[in-house]
Amino acid sequence: MSRLVVVSNRVADPRKSAAGGLAVALGDALNDTGGLWFGWSGRIIEPGQSEGSAPQLQRAGRVTLATVDLSREDHDSYYLGYSNGVLWPVFHYRLDLADFDAGYIAGYRRVNRLFAQKLMTLLHPDDVIWVHDYHLIPLAAELRAMGCTQRIGFFLHIPLPPPQMLAAIPQHEWLIRALFAYDLVGFQSEVDVQHFSRYVRNEADAQVLGEDRYRAFGRTTVAQAFPIGIDVDEFMRLSHAREACETYDTMREQYSRRRLLIGVDRLDYSKGIPHRVRAFRELLKHYPENRNSATLIQIASPTRESVDAYADIRQELEGLCGAINGDYGELDWMPVRYIHRTVARKRIPGLCRAADVGLVTPLRDGMNLVAKEYIAAQNPEDPGVLVLSRFAGAAEQLKEALLVNPYDVHGTAEAIQQALRMPLEERVRRHQKLLARIREHDVHWWRRRFLDTLAQAGD
Ligand code: GDG
Protein backbone atom coordinates (compact mmCIF):
# COMPACT_ATOMS: atom_id res chain seq x y z
CA MET A 1 0.00 0.00 0.00
CA SER A 2 1.34 3.46 -0.89
CA ARG A 3 2.19 5.90 1.86
CA LEU A 4 0.02 9.02 2.01
CA VAL A 5 1.75 12.40 2.19
CA VAL A 6 -0.51 15.32 3.09
CA VAL A 7 0.74 18.86 2.51
CA SER A 8 -1.03 21.93 3.85
CA ASN A 9 -0.03 25.37 5.06
CA ARG A 10 -0.33 24.26 8.70
CA VAL A 11 -0.17 20.79 10.21
CA ALA A 12 -1.98 19.52 13.28
CA ASP A 13 -1.47 16.62 15.64
CA PRO A 14 -4.33 14.29 14.56
CA ARG A 15 -4.54 12.78 18.06
CA LYS A 16 -5.77 16.05 19.54
CA SER A 17 -9.54 16.38 19.06
CA ALA A 18 -9.28 20.16 19.43
CA ALA A 19 -7.83 20.14 15.94
CA GLY A 20 -11.33 19.67 14.48
CA GLY A 21 -12.96 17.53 11.81
CA LEU A 22 -10.55 18.05 8.94
CA ALA A 23 -7.48 17.21 11.01
CA VAL A 24 -9.28 14.14 12.35
CA ALA A 25 -10.20 12.97 8.85
CA LEU A 26 -6.75 13.52 7.41
CA GLY A 27 -5.26 11.98 10.54
CA ASP A 28 -7.47 8.91 10.02
CA ALA A 29 -6.30 8.56 6.44
CA LEU A 30 -2.68 8.99 7.48
CA ASN A 31 -3.08 6.49 10.32
CA ASP A 32 -4.46 3.80 7.99
CA THR A 33 -1.20 3.43 6.10
CA GLY A 34 1.17 5.40 8.28
CA GLY A 35 1.91 8.69 6.66
CA LEU A 36 3.58 12.06 6.55
CA TRP A 37 2.00 15.46 7.11
CA PHE A 38 4.10 18.35 5.87
CA GLY A 39 3.65 22.11 6.36
CA TRP A 40 4.68 25.31 8.06
CA SER A 41 5.56 25.01 11.76
CA GLY A 42 3.80 28.28 12.62
CA ARG A 43 7.20 29.71 13.68
CA ILE A 44 8.61 32.87 12.15
CA ILE A 45 12.36 33.40 12.01
CA GLU A 46 13.16 37.07 12.64
CA PRO A 47 16.02 38.72 10.68
CA GLY A 48 19.34 37.73 12.26
CA GLN A 49 18.03 34.41 13.65
CA SER A 50 19.27 31.33 11.85
CA GLU A 51 16.94 28.98 9.96
CA GLY A 52 17.24 25.23 10.38
CA SER A 53 17.93 23.60 7.03
CA ALA A 54 16.19 20.22 7.48
CA PRO A 55 12.45 19.86 8.21
CA GLN A 56 11.66 19.24 11.88
CA LEU A 57 10.23 15.76 12.36
CA GLN A 58 7.86 14.72 15.11
CA ARG A 59 6.03 11.42 15.66
CA ALA A 60 2.29 11.55 16.36
CA GLY A 61 1.16 7.91 16.57
CA ARG A 62 1.66 6.37 13.13
CA VAL A 63 1.92 9.81 11.56
CA THR A 64 5.09 11.82 11.10
CA LEU A 65 4.65 15.57 11.24
CA ALA A 66 7.29 17.39 9.21
CA THR A 67 7.48 21.16 9.50
CA VAL A 68 9.58 24.04 8.28
CA ASP A 69 9.95 27.57 9.66
CA LEU A 70 9.41 30.70 7.56
CA SER A 71 11.40 33.93 7.57
CA ARG A 72 9.48 37.09 8.52
CA GLU A 73 9.73 38.33 4.92
CA ASP A 74 8.42 35.06 3.44
CA HIS A 75 5.61 34.86 5.96
CA ASP A 76 4.49 38.41 5.21
CA SER A 77 4.55 38.08 1.41
CA TYR A 78 3.49 34.44 0.99
CA TYR A 79 0.94 34.12 3.80
CA LEU A 80 -0.39 37.59 4.63
CA GLY A 81 0.31 39.08 1.20
CA TYR A 82 -0.38 36.77 -1.70
CA SER A 83 -2.44 34.03 0.00
CA ASN A 84 -4.65 36.19 2.20
CA GLY A 85 -4.39 39.59 0.48
CA VAL A 86 -4.84 38.40 -3.13
CA LEU A 87 -6.09 34.82 -3.48
CA TRP A 88 -8.52 34.74 -0.54
CA PRO A 89 -10.48 37.90 -1.51
CA VAL A 90 -10.50 37.25 -5.27
CA PHE A 91 -11.50 33.60 -4.87
CA HIS A 92 -14.35 34.88 -2.65
CA TYR A 93 -15.43 37.30 -5.40
CA ARG A 94 -14.12 40.37 -3.54
CA LEU A 95 -11.95 42.18 -6.08
CA ASP A 96 -12.57 45.36 -4.07
CA LEU A 97 -10.63 43.93 -1.11
CA ALA A 98 -7.67 42.52 -3.04
CA ASP A 99 -4.26 44.10 -2.54
CA PHE A 100 -2.40 43.44 -5.80
CA ASP A 101 1.00 44.48 -4.45
CA ALA A 102 3.51 43.34 -7.08
CA GLY A 103 5.97 42.33 -4.35
CA TYR A 104 3.91 39.48 -2.93
CA ILE A 105 4.18 36.97 -5.75
CA ALA A 106 7.93 36.49 -5.31
CA GLY A 107 7.40 35.37 -1.70
CA TYR A 108 4.57 33.02 -2.74
CA ARG A 109 6.81 31.36 -5.33
CA ARG A 110 9.76 31.26 -2.94
CA VAL A 111 7.82 29.49 -0.18
CA ASN A 112 6.27 26.99 -2.60
CA ARG A 113 9.76 26.23 -3.92
CA LEU A 114 11.11 25.94 -0.37
CA PHE A 115 8.29 23.51 0.55
CA ALA A 116 9.03 21.48 -2.59
CA GLN A 117 12.78 21.32 -1.87
CA LYS A 118 12.30 20.23 1.72
CA LEU A 119 9.56 17.76 0.85
CA MET A 120 11.64 16.13 -1.91
CA THR A 121 14.17 14.99 0.69
CA LEU A 122 11.43 13.04 2.52
CA LEU A 123 9.60 11.34 -0.37
CA HIS A 124 9.51 7.61 -1.17
CA PRO A 125 9.05 6.40 -4.76
CA ASP A 126 5.51 5.03 -4.29
CA ASP A 127 4.12 7.87 -2.13
CA VAL A 128 0.78 9.46 -2.98
CA ILE A 129 0.81 13.20 -2.32
CA TRP A 130 -2.30 15.21 -1.40
CA VAL A 131 -1.86 19.00 -1.38
CA HIS A 132 -4.41 21.29 0.27
CA ASP A 133 -5.64 24.75 -0.53
CA TYR A 134 -4.82 28.07 -2.14
CA HIS A 135 -1.52 28.65 -0.33
CA LEU A 136 0.06 25.82 -2.29
CA ILE A 137 -1.33 25.94 -5.86
CA PRO A 138 2.12 25.86 -7.55
CA LEU A 139 3.58 23.15 -5.29
CA ALA A 140 3.16 20.27 -7.75
CA ALA A 141 4.71 22.30 -10.56
CA GLU A 142 7.73 22.97 -8.33
CA LEU A 143 7.93 19.29 -7.34
CA ARG A 144 7.68 18.16 -10.98
CA ALA A 145 10.48 20.55 -11.95
CA MET A 146 12.63 18.80 -9.31
CA GLY A 147 11.89 15.38 -10.83
CA CYS A 148 8.96 14.24 -8.69
CA THR A 149 6.95 11.60 -10.61
CA GLN A 150 4.65 10.47 -7.79
CA ARG A 151 0.90 10.85 -8.04
CA ILE A 152 -0.18 14.30 -6.76
CA GLY A 153 -3.70 15.51 -6.02
CA PHE A 154 -4.89 18.97 -5.03
CA PHE A 155 -8.01 20.03 -3.12
CA LEU A 156 -9.21 23.64 -3.07
CA HIS A 157 -11.15 24.34 0.13
CA ILE A 158 -12.38 27.75 -1.02
CA PRO A 159 -14.48 28.67 -4.09
CA LEU A 160 -13.08 29.14 -7.58
CA PRO A 161 -14.53 32.37 -9.01
CA PRO A 162 -15.85 32.84 -12.57
CA PRO A 163 -13.16 33.23 -15.27
CA GLN A 164 -13.63 37.00 -15.66
CA MET A 165 -12.95 37.49 -11.99
CA LEU A 166 -10.03 35.08 -11.87
CA ALA A 167 -8.52 37.01 -14.76
CA ALA A 168 -8.15 40.05 -12.49
CA ILE A 169 -5.22 38.33 -10.80
CA PRO A 170 -2.12 39.34 -12.76
CA GLN A 171 -0.74 35.77 -12.53
CA HIS A 172 -4.04 34.01 -13.35
CA GLU A 173 -2.70 32.04 -16.26
CA TRP A 174 0.34 30.90 -14.32
CA LEU A 175 -1.90 29.74 -11.44
CA ILE A 176 -4.20 27.68 -13.64
CA ARG A 177 -1.30 26.25 -15.63
CA ALA A 178 0.15 25.15 -12.26
CA LEU A 179 -3.00 23.14 -11.57
CA PHE A 180 -2.20 20.97 -14.59
CA ALA A 181 0.86 19.62 -12.78
CA TYR A 182 -1.57 17.69 -10.56
CA ASP A 183 -3.11 14.36 -11.57
CA LEU A 184 -6.37 15.32 -9.88
CA VAL A 185 -7.84 18.70 -8.92
CA GLY A 186 -10.75 18.64 -6.46
CA PHE A 187 -13.23 21.44 -5.84
CA GLN A 188 -15.98 21.83 -3.24
CA SER A 189 -18.95 22.30 -5.57
CA GLU A 190 -20.19 21.82 -9.13
CA VAL A 191 -20.22 25.61 -9.58
CA ASP A 192 -16.47 25.70 -8.95
CA VAL A 193 -15.89 22.90 -11.47
CA GLN A 194 -17.94 24.83 -14.06
CA HIS A 195 -15.76 27.91 -13.51
CA PHE A 196 -12.61 25.82 -13.95
CA SER A 197 -13.98 24.21 -17.06
CA ARG A 198 -15.02 27.53 -18.62
CA TYR A 199 -11.69 29.14 -17.79
CA VAL A 200 -9.53 26.40 -19.30
CA ARG A 201 -11.67 26.11 -22.43
CA ASN A 202 -11.81 29.85 -23.08
CA GLU A 203 -8.43 31.07 -21.86
CA ALA A 204 -6.21 28.02 -22.32
CA ASP A 205 -7.81 26.33 -25.32
CA ALA A 206 -8.15 23.15 -23.27
CA GLN A 207 -9.55 20.01 -24.83
CA VAL A 208 -12.20 18.25 -22.80
CA LEU A 209 -11.45 14.56 -23.09
CA GLY A 210 -14.54 13.29 -21.26
CA GLU A 211 -14.83 11.76 -17.78
CA ASP A 212 -13.78 15.09 -16.28
CA ARG A 213 -10.39 15.02 -18.03
CA TYR A 214 -8.91 18.22 -19.45
CA ARG A 215 -5.85 18.61 -21.65
CA ALA A 216 -3.93 21.91 -21.76
CA PHE A 217 -0.35 23.17 -21.39
CA GLY A 218 0.87 19.78 -22.66
CA ARG A 219 -0.59 17.92 -19.65
CA THR A 220 -3.81 16.16 -18.71
CA THR A 221 -5.61 16.52 -15.41
CA VAL A 222 -8.91 15.40 -13.93
CA ALA A 223 -11.16 17.99 -12.24
CA GLN A 224 -14.18 17.06 -10.11
CA ALA A 225 -16.28 18.20 -7.16
CA PHE A 226 -15.68 16.47 -3.83
CA PRO A 227 -17.95 18.24 -1.32
CA ILE A 228 -16.27 18.02 2.07
CA GLY A 229 -18.27 16.73 5.04
CA ILE A 230 -17.89 16.55 8.80
CA ASP A 231 -17.22 13.59 11.06
CA VAL A 232 -20.89 13.19 12.02
CA ASP A 233 -20.31 10.44 14.60
CA GLU A 234 -17.52 12.34 16.30
CA PHE A 235 -19.59 15.53 16.39
CA MET A 236 -22.56 13.67 17.85
CA ARG A 237 -20.34 12.13 20.51
CA LEU A 238 -19.06 15.59 21.32
CA SER A 239 -22.60 16.90 21.51
CA HIS A 240 -23.53 14.31 24.18
CA ALA A 241 -20.39 14.87 26.25
CA ARG A 242 -20.47 16.75 29.56
CA GLU A 243 -19.28 20.18 28.36
CA ALA A 244 -21.82 20.35 25.53
CA CYS A 245 -24.65 19.25 27.83
CA GLU A 246 -23.67 21.84 30.45
CA THR A 247 -23.62 24.56 27.80
CA TYR A 248 -27.00 23.43 26.48
CA ASP A 249 -28.57 23.43 29.97
CA THR A 250 -27.17 26.87 30.83
CA MET A 251 -28.42 28.40 27.58
CA ARG A 252 -31.89 26.86 27.83
CA GLU A 253 -32.19 28.00 31.42
CA GLN A 254 -31.10 31.56 30.64
CA TYR A 255 -33.40 31.78 27.64
CA SER A 256 -36.27 29.65 28.92
CA ARG A 257 -39.02 31.87 27.57
CA ARG A 258 -37.04 33.25 24.68
CA ARG A 259 -35.97 32.20 21.20
CA LEU A 260 -32.32 31.72 20.42
CA LEU A 261 -30.46 32.21 17.13
CA ILE A 262 -26.81 31.26 16.68
CA GLY A 263 -23.98 32.21 14.35
CA VAL A 264 -20.50 30.65 14.67
CA ASP A 265 -17.84 31.92 12.31
CA ARG A 266 -14.30 33.10 12.00
CA LEU A 267 -14.55 36.88 11.83
CA ASP A 268 -14.04 36.92 8.07
CA TYR A 269 -15.67 39.25 5.56
CA SER A 270 -16.69 36.25 3.44
CA LYS A 271 -19.01 35.02 6.21
CA GLY A 272 -21.55 37.84 5.78
CA ILE A 273 -21.82 38.60 9.52
CA PRO A 274 -22.79 42.31 9.20
CA HIS A 275 -25.47 41.42 6.62
CA ARG A 276 -26.79 38.78 9.04
CA VAL A 277 -26.93 41.25 11.93
CA ARG A 278 -28.79 43.72 9.70
CA ALA A 279 -31.27 40.98 8.80
CA PHE A 280 -31.78 40.36 12.52
CA ARG A 281 -32.43 44.09 13.05
CA GLU A 282 -34.97 43.96 10.23
CA LEU A 283 -36.67 41.03 11.99
CA LEU A 284 -37.02 43.04 15.21
CA LYS A 285 -38.29 46.03 13.26
CA HIS A 286 -40.95 44.23 11.20
CA TYR A 287 -42.00 41.50 13.60
CA PRO A 288 -42.31 43.17 17.03
CA GLU A 289 -43.32 39.91 18.70
CA ASN A 290 -39.61 39.02 18.55
CA ARG A 291 -38.61 42.01 20.69
CA ASN A 292 -37.69 41.08 24.23
CA SER A 293 -37.50 37.50 22.97
CA ALA A 294 -35.35 36.54 19.95
CA THR A 295 -31.65 36.73 20.87
CA LEU A 296 -28.79 36.38 18.44
CA ILE A 297 -25.60 34.89 19.82
CA GLN A 298 -22.83 35.60 17.36
CA ILE A 299 -19.47 33.99 17.98
CA ALA A 300 -16.83 35.62 15.85
CA SER A 301 -13.53 33.92 16.32
CA PRO A 302 -10.55 36.27 15.70
CA THR A 303 -8.54 35.56 12.57
CA ARG A 304 -5.85 37.22 10.35
CA GLU A 305 -6.00 40.39 12.40
CA SER A 306 -2.95 41.93 10.78
CA VAL A 307 -4.71 42.11 7.38
CA ASP A 308 -6.48 45.52 7.11
CA ALA A 309 -9.82 44.24 5.76
CA TYR A 310 -10.20 42.14 8.92
CA ALA A 311 -9.77 45.11 11.25
CA ASP A 312 -12.41 47.00 9.20
CA ILE A 313 -15.01 44.25 9.46
CA ARG A 314 -14.49 44.03 13.20
CA GLN A 315 -15.15 47.73 13.60
CA GLU A 316 -18.25 47.60 11.41
CA LEU A 317 -19.66 44.71 13.40
CA GLU A 318 -19.00 46.30 16.79
CA GLY A 319 -20.82 49.44 15.64
CA LEU A 320 -23.80 47.49 14.33
CA CYS A 321 -24.23 45.29 17.41
CA GLY A 322 -23.92 48.30 19.71
CA ALA A 323 -26.57 50.20 17.72
CA ILE A 324 -29.08 47.33 17.80
CA ASN A 325 -28.60 46.75 21.50
CA GLY A 326 -29.00 50.49 22.07
CA ASP A 327 -32.20 50.68 19.98
CA TYR A 328 -33.96 47.50 21.13
CA GLY A 329 -32.29 46.41 24.40
CA GLU A 330 -34.21 46.30 27.70
CA LEU A 331 -32.90 46.37 31.24
CA ASP A 332 -33.09 42.57 31.39
CA TRP A 333 -32.57 41.64 27.72
CA MET A 334 -30.09 42.45 24.96
CA PRO A 335 -30.92 41.36 21.40
CA VAL A 336 -27.34 40.62 20.30
CA ARG A 337 -24.64 38.84 22.24
CA TYR A 338 -21.53 39.34 20.20
CA ILE A 339 -18.50 37.36 21.34
CA HIS A 340 -15.21 38.20 19.67
CA ARG A 341 -13.34 35.18 20.99
CA THR A 342 -12.72 31.56 20.11
CA VAL A 343 -15.13 29.36 22.06
CA ALA A 344 -13.92 25.90 23.17
CA ARG A 345 -14.83 23.30 20.51
CA LYS A 346 -16.49 21.07 23.12
CA ARG A 347 -19.09 23.79 23.86
CA ILE A 348 -20.13 24.42 20.25
CA PRO A 349 -22.51 21.43 19.83
CA GLY A 350 -24.35 22.48 23.03
CA LEU A 351 -24.76 26.02 21.74
CA CYS A 352 -26.02 24.73 18.37
CA ARG A 353 -28.54 22.38 20.01
CA ALA A 354 -29.88 25.14 22.25
CA ALA A 355 -30.51 27.43 19.25
CA ASP A 356 -33.93 27.43 17.54
CA VAL A 357 -32.30 28.81 14.39
CA GLY A 358 -28.80 28.35 12.97
CA LEU A 359 -27.69 31.27 10.81
CA VAL A 360 -25.10 30.35 8.19
CA THR A 361 -25.23 33.19 5.71
CA PRO A 362 -21.84 33.69 4.03
CA LEU A 363 -21.60 35.99 1.02
CA ARG A 364 -19.45 33.25 -0.50
CA ASP A 365 -18.04 30.06 1.01
CA GLY A 366 -16.30 26.99 -0.40
CA MET A 367 -18.50 24.65 1.66
CA ASN A 368 -19.14 25.83 5.26
CA LEU A 369 -18.85 23.15 7.89
CA VAL A 370 -20.83 25.04 10.53
CA ALA A 371 -24.00 24.35 8.51
CA LYS A 372 -23.34 20.61 8.80
CA GLU A 373 -22.32 20.85 12.47
CA TYR A 374 -25.57 22.67 13.28
CA ILE A 375 -27.59 19.82 11.72
CA ALA A 376 -25.59 17.12 13.51
CA ALA A 377 -26.06 18.83 16.89
CA GLN A 378 -29.88 18.99 16.79
CA ASN A 379 -32.27 16.92 18.85
CA PRO A 380 -34.01 14.88 16.11
CA GLU A 381 -37.32 15.01 17.99
CA ASP A 382 -37.35 18.80 18.27
CA PRO A 383 -34.77 20.14 15.82
CA GLY A 384 -33.91 23.75 15.07
CA VAL A 385 -34.01 25.23 11.56
CA LEU A 386 -30.98 26.01 9.42
CA VAL A 387 -31.07 29.29 7.48
CA LEU A 388 -28.40 28.88 4.82
CA SER A 389 -26.91 31.18 2.19
CA ARG A 390 -27.41 30.02 -1.37
CA PHE A 391 -23.80 31.15 -1.92
CA ALA A 392 -22.28 28.55 0.41
CA GLY A 393 -21.05 25.40 -1.34
CA ALA A 394 -23.17 23.51 1.22
CA ALA A 395 -26.35 24.84 -0.45
CA GLU A 396 -25.82 22.42 -3.37
CA GLN A 397 -26.44 19.55 -0.93
CA LEU A 398 -28.59 21.00 1.86
CA LYS A 399 -31.71 21.82 -0.12
CA GLU A 400 -34.07 21.32 2.85
CA ALA A 401 -32.54 24.24 4.73
CA LEU A 402 -34.20 27.64 4.26
CA LEU A 403 -32.01 29.00 1.48
CA VAL A 404 -31.48 32.77 1.42
CA ASN A 405 -29.68 35.45 -0.54
CA PRO A 406 -27.65 37.14 2.22
CA TYR A 407 -27.44 40.42 0.25
CA ASP A 408 -31.23 40.60 0.47
CA VAL A 409 -31.46 41.67 4.10
CA HIS A 410 -35.26 41.88 4.09
CA GLY A 411 -35.63 38.45 2.43
CA THR A 412 -33.28 36.97 5.04
CA ALA A 413 -35.36 38.49 7.86
CA GLU A 414 -38.46 36.89 6.33
CA ALA A 415 -36.72 33.51 6.26
CA ILE A 416 -35.68 33.87 9.91
CA GLN A 417 -39.30 34.62 10.82
CA GLN A 418 -40.42 31.55 8.85
CA ALA A 419 -37.81 29.47 10.74
CA LEU A 420 -39.00 30.77 14.11
CA ARG A 421 -42.60 29.88 13.30
CA MET A 422 -42.02 26.56 11.55
CA PRO A 423 -44.27 23.77 12.92
CA LEU A 424 -42.60 20.82 14.64
CA GLU A 425 -43.67 18.32 12.00
CA GLU A 426 -42.04 20.33 9.17
CA ARG A 427 -38.87 20.87 11.22
CA VAL A 428 -38.54 17.13 11.84
CA ARG A 429 -39.16 16.29 8.19
CA ARG A 430 -36.52 18.72 6.93
CA HIS A 431 -34.03 17.72 9.59
CA GLN A 432 -34.31 13.99 8.80
CA LYS A 433 -33.43 14.64 5.17
CA LEU A 434 -30.55 16.95 6.03
CA LEU A 435 -29.11 14.54 8.58
CA ALA A 436 -29.28 11.64 6.13
CA ARG A 437 -27.42 13.72 3.56
CA ILE A 438 -24.55 14.79 5.86
CA ARG A 439 -24.25 11.21 7.12
CA GLU A 440 -24.00 9.78 3.64
CA HIS A 441 -21.47 12.38 2.53
CA ASP A 442 -19.36 12.68 5.66
CA VAL A 443 -15.68 13.52 5.87
CA HIS A 444 -14.60 9.85 5.59
CA TRP A 445 -16.60 9.50 2.37
CA TRP A 446 -14.92 12.68 1.10
CA ARG A 447 -11.36 11.55 1.62
CA ARG A 448 -12.03 7.99 0.40
CA ARG A 449 -13.61 9.30 -2.78
CA PHE A 450 -10.78 11.75 -3.36
CA LEU A 451 -8.02 9.19 -2.76
CA ASP A 452 -9.77 6.49 -4.83
CA THR A 453 -10.17 8.91 -7.73
CA LEU A 454 -6.54 10.01 -7.39
CA ALA A 455 -5.42 6.37 -7.44
CA GLN A 456 -7.13 5.98 -10.84
CA ALA A 457 -6.33 9.39 -12.33
CA GLY A 458 -3.58 9.50 -14.88
CA ASP A 459 -3.83 5.76 -15.73
C1 GDG B 1 -12.46 26.64 4.89
C2 GDG B 1 -13.47 27.14 3.82
C3 GDG B 1 -14.70 24.97 4.05
C4 GDG B 1 -15.61 28.56 14.23
N1 GDG B 1 -15.57 29.40 15.29
C5 GDG B 1 -15.07 28.68 16.31
C6 GDG B 1 -14.80 27.39 15.84
N2 GDG B 1 -15.14 27.35 14.56
C7 GDG B 1 -15.05 26.12 13.74
C8 GDG B 1 -16.39 25.68 13.22
C9 GDG B 1 -15.97 24.87 12.00
C10 GDG B 1 -14.71 25.60 11.53
O1 GDG B 1 -14.24 26.36 12.62
C11 GDG B 1 -15.03 26.57 10.40
O2 GDG B 1 -15.23 25.86 9.22
P1 GDG B 1 -15.92 26.54 7.96
O3 GDG B 1 -16.13 25.48 6.95
O4 GDG B 1 -17.17 27.19 8.38
O5 GDG B 1 -14.98 27.72 7.46
P2 GDG B 1 -13.41 28.06 7.15
O6 GDG B 1 -12.61 28.14 8.38
O7 GDG B 1 -13.47 29.31 6.35
O8 GDG B 1 -12.87 26.82 6.24
C12 GDG B 1 -14.83 26.49 4.04
C13 GDG B 1 -13.59 24.52 5.00
O9 GDG B 1 -12.36 25.20 4.72
C14 GDG B 1 -13.33 23.02 4.89
O10 GDG B 1 -13.02 22.66 3.57
O11 GDG B 1 -15.93 24.40 4.46
O12 GDG B 1 -15.73 26.89 3.01
O13 GDG B 1 -13.57 28.56 3.85
O14 GDG B 1 -15.60 23.56 12.34
O15 GDG B 1 -17.06 24.94 14.22
N3 GDG B 1 -14.27 26.42 16.60
C15 GDG B 1 -14.01 26.73 17.90
N4 GDG B 1 -14.26 27.97 18.43
C16 GDG B 1 -14.79 28.96 17.68
O16 GDG B 1 -15.00 30.08 18.18
N5 GDG B 1 -13.48 25.79 18.69
Image: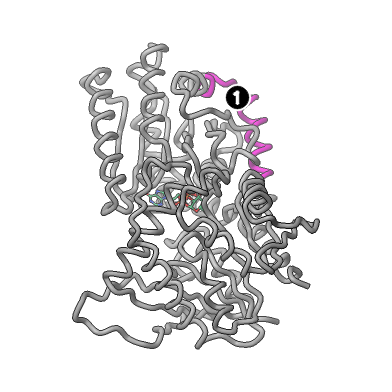
Residue 242 x, y percent position in the rendering: 43, 52
Residue 248 visible to the viewer = no
Q: Which residue is mark 1?
A: 424
| Colour scheme of the rendered structure | one colour
In this rendering, the answer to whether 425 lies above or below 161 is above
Total labels drawn? 1
Drawn side of residue 258 relative to residue 426, left or right? left
- Image spot of residue 93 (x, y percent): 48, 42
| Residue at image location 62% in from the left, 50% down from the top | 199
Magenta-drawn stretch contains 429 = yes
Helix, strand or loop status at disc 1? helix
Tell me: residue 23, above or below residue 92.
below
Q: Residues within 10 Å of mark 1 (few under 14, many from 20)?
A: few
Q: Is residue 329 left or right of residue 111?
A: left
Of residues 444 and 81, the one nearer the viewer is 81
Residue depicted at 68% across the width and 58% down the height: 223
The magenta stretch is 418-437
From this view, report whether residue 123 is shown above or below residue 401.
Answer: below
The reply, left or right, for residue 360 in relation to residue 102 is right
